[in-house]
Image (cartoon, grey):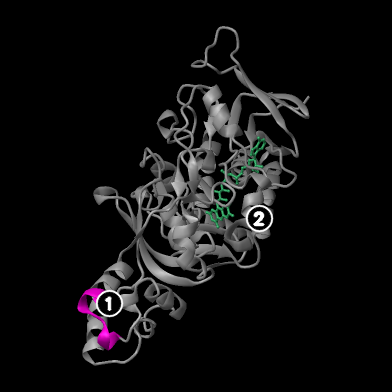
Amino acid sequence: MSTFDAIILGAGAAGLFCAARAGQRGLRVLLIDHADEVAEKIRISGGGRANFTNRDLDPAAPQRHFLSANPHFCRSALARFAPRDFIGLLQRRGVGFHEKHKGQLFCDRSAEDLIGLLLAECEAAAAHGGRVERWQPCRVRGVRFQAESGSSAQQTSASSYSIDSDQGTVSAPALVVATGGLSIPKIGATDLGQRLARQFGLTVTGLRPGLVPLTFDGAAWAPYAQLAGLALPVAISTGAKKQRITFHEDLLFTHRGLSGPAVLQISSYWQPGTPIEIDLTQGVDLLAELAAAKARGTRKLIAGVLAAWLPQRLADAWARQDPAWQRPIAEASDKALTQLAERLSCWQLTPTGTEGYKKAEVTVGGVDTRELSSQTMEAKAQPGLYFIGEVVDVTGWLGGYNFQWAWASAAACAEAL
Ligand code: FDA
């Protein structure tokens, strides 16, 4: 019967990379995944080209690009396996990539190239005396911990984890949980990792969809529903005082609400029941511009004047909301222009919800990092049990940060196995 040094649950970004790194250290690794194909999320990521990392990442200031109840937890792993390390791997394997926006790196051809790279890295284990075997599709029925007699969870050199699966029972001294977050259940996301954490006494922080479109009440949204498909750059904010966060990105109107990078970013910080604020003016002093247009005696309608800075459809939709805004600018009252400029520079609106895990790119929250070693990702009170990737309470911004966390946490764990 095959014996393994480690079993990894989940053959996604983190699981595959961890298997490859451990295999290349000479370990015998078994990867188990219930999906038909490996790494379905890599396949659909970045519009099919996988935004696999970001050049702009400062591990000394992780809160700049990551959310976590324990913000400094991810520092060590991110510092030890940096974006340049993953970039080096692509270069060695000849996978072409390019930079798009704000340091985001994408495959030139297809996300399949990245999946091919990870599988080739797993195969390369053989050259180092290791082995990566994959059971897939294979359903996990349960996980048991067997402490050798005389040993407790704290003294475990001979203890092991047994996985009962569709392909039989298999045991190893180390179990790595890399089953990801809850988003996009139709391609294989489940809560197995979070359930296993609870089974072994770990806390799972509150979970919610992140990097997700926001939705609004049907009637209140009616004036904007006709704008579906329209995109423009904005500044978007949420939170009060010290918690306040602002992103400068593109906003996209949809039939049910708002999306686009600006909204996906802010959604990870948005708390239900609280407002978001959007500055649609793109840094223009709108009041001064409108007052100047009025002073020139322009006969243009206000919506026509606004179109110098806003898409015409948006300008028309705004002007329609108040009769005082539906006249030539020369005839508009100062009060009406002030209100218009204020509302466009601070459009305050309270989402009714999000599009949920069906559309979310990530899950905010996860296995409580206070119960894991930041050096190895091992559960402090359950030796031999590791959590890596998105199942952990570390959530990156849009822009390649979630994959970088998958690579870095996988590398930290593989070193320790
Ligand atoms: P991942 O989800 O990759 O892998 C988990 C694996 O566990 C899967 O193979 C799954 O089948 C398996 N599994 C789950 N439950 C199981 C069970 N019960 N039994 C056995 N196996 C089980 N990030 C980024 O940095 N750049 C990007 O461009 C994008 N783009 C993007 C687009 C879309 C549409 C989504 C949904 C997500 C992204 N992301 C992203 C986020 C990124 O995909 C995500 O953070 C990583 O894939 C997380 O890697 P993990 O390995 O932790 O989980």
What kind of residue is marked 2? Arg
**Local crowd size for mark 1, using a 10 Å CA cut-off: few (<14), some (14–19), many (≥20):** many
- Nearer to the camera, 401 or 271: 271
Residue at the front extreme, as displayed: 323
Residue 415 locus on image (x, y percent):
53, 37
Q: Residue at x 53, y 68 (%)?
A: 228
- Any magenta on residue 332? yes
Residue 345 locus on image (x, y percent):
30, 68
Residue 272 locus on image (x, y percent):
41, 45
- The answer for how far apart the CA atoms under marks 1 and 2 are is 43 Å
Q: Quadrant of the N terminus?
A: top right
Choose top left, top right, bottom left or bottom right for residue 394.
top left
What kind of residue is marked 1? Leu
Which residue corresponds to mark 2? 43
Asked whether residue 196 appears in the rendered view, the answer is yes
Asked whether residue 54 appears in the rendered view, the answer is no
- Any magenta on residue 208? no
Q: Which residues are magenta?
A: 329-337
**Left or right relative to 408: residue 275:** left
Give the mark nearer the N terminus: 1 vs 2.
2
- Nearer to the camera, 48 or 387: 48
Which residue corresponds to mark 1? 286
Residue 270 locus on image (x, y percent):
39, 49
Predominant SS of the magenta segment: helix
Q: Residue at x 29, y 48 (%)?
A: 243
User: Does 183 appear above or below 201?
Assistant: below
User: Does 346 appear above or below 300?
Assistant: above
Q: Nearer the viewer, mark 1 or mark 2?
A: 1
**Local crowd size for mark 2, using a 10 Å CA cut-off: few (<14), some (14–19), many (≥20):** many
Q: Residue at x 42, y 42 (%)?
A: 74
- Nearer to the camera, 416 or 55: 55
Q: CB of mark 1 within 8 Å of CB of mark 2? A: no
